[in-house]
Image (tube, helix red, strand yellow):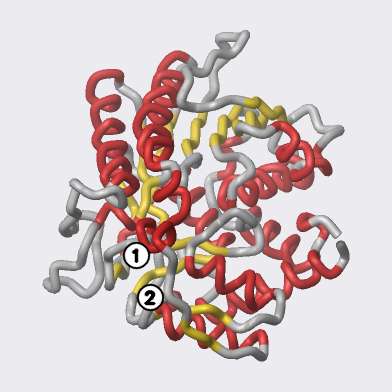
Amino acid sequence: MDIHEHPLYKEDVKRVAELPLPWEKIQDVSILISGATGLIGSFLIDVLMWRNTYKKANCRILALGRSEEKAKRRFAYCRDSSLIHFLSHDINEPLQLQTDETIEYVLHLASNTHPVAYATDPIGTITTNIIGLKNMLDFSVQHHAKRFAFASSNEIYGENRGDQELFDEHYCGYIDCNTLRAGYPESKRCGEALCQAYMKQKGLDVVIPRLTRSYGPTMLDSDTKAISQFIKKAVNGEDIVLKSAGNQYYSYTYMADAVSGLLTVLLLGKMGEAYNIADQHSDITLKDLAATLAKIAGTKVIFEIPDATEKAGYSKATKARLDGKKLGFFNWRPFYNIEDGLYKTLIILKDILGDK
């Protein structure tokens, strides 16, 4: 079974696609999405295609990514639709279309987002968030975009200074910029500043959704985030491997909730503003996260020393909990807490893998 056929996954897609949002803004428009086959991008495209199918949205999707083969597999169910087109492209190179048509919305979701990538491809991590972003911003100006969304990260907040339990959108903690691991958070910070520059100098309308640690059945097999590794072990019925004391206290977001927040920011957010997509019901320590997954899977948690590559890519932040009140002003609420989101992820992935 493909993921889009799973009844629980279809339930998530329908739930987000029927949210009380101003969907008329994406009626009869074109949307460009980078990172189209990623955890967030793929689910977002499924939601938009649901709107096309059941609500006659006539929303043309330009799905941008490096692997055409991967995109054709992931979106095989759309092969007969004229409303989705895949563009194979490295966003570190300028993007050119054969037409000057208006692309009303551009969403830059492409990024290295897991520890091994930070450690093994630090240059690519930085350039995607700065050079790739610049190319997408230039494209948006050229094609007269109504709005641009830059998917930023909870990592821009850096280390908790001990003065605030929850990070609101104005918090700024410490990052040691002279380290390999700083490439991801510092390039996201720079990316946000670049967006502000394009607003001022080019008049581009930009919003910045700040995603926290996201998970769900659309996660990539190559993802090396701790939660993704835990989920893979749980799906396979194996013991959960914890590679630290597990005292890190973070915010997490289920895939459907991350996309519902992203769409809320895109369609309702104020120009130039950043918005945390987070809810305290999904804040959890790493050791409790491991224990929760082990309980669901019927296994146990074991400790293992990380290798040098893994250790180099780990975040140094020990507490990073985001304040989601600002997005809540738009009546955004998540569908799932951490336990329910993890349970649903495991059920969907087990059923999909069991059919292969």
Q: Is residue 215 above or below residue 136?
A: below
Q: Are marks 1 and 2 in contact (CB under 8 Å)?
A: yes
Question: Which quarter of the figure is the N terminus placed in?
Answer: bottom right
Question: Which quarter of the figure is the C terminus placed in?
Answer: bottom right
Q: Earlier in the sequence, mark 1 or mark 2?
A: 2
Q: Secondary structure at mark 1?
A: loop
Please name the amino acid that badge 1 sits on.
Gly
Which is nearer the eye, 104 or 320?
320
Q: Position of residue 211 (x, y in %)?
A: 41, 55
Disc 1 crowd rating (10 Å Cα; few below 14, some 14-19, many 20+) is many
Q: Position of residue 122 (x, y in %)?
A: 38, 42
Q: Which mark is residue 324?
A: 1
Q: Position of residue 149 (x, y in %)?
A: 43, 38
Q: Is residue 184 above or below residue 138?
A: below
Q: Provide the residue designation for mark 2.
A: 280
Please name the amino acid that badge 2 sits on.
Gln
Q: Is residue 51 above or below residue 256?
A: above
Residue 127 figure quarter: top left
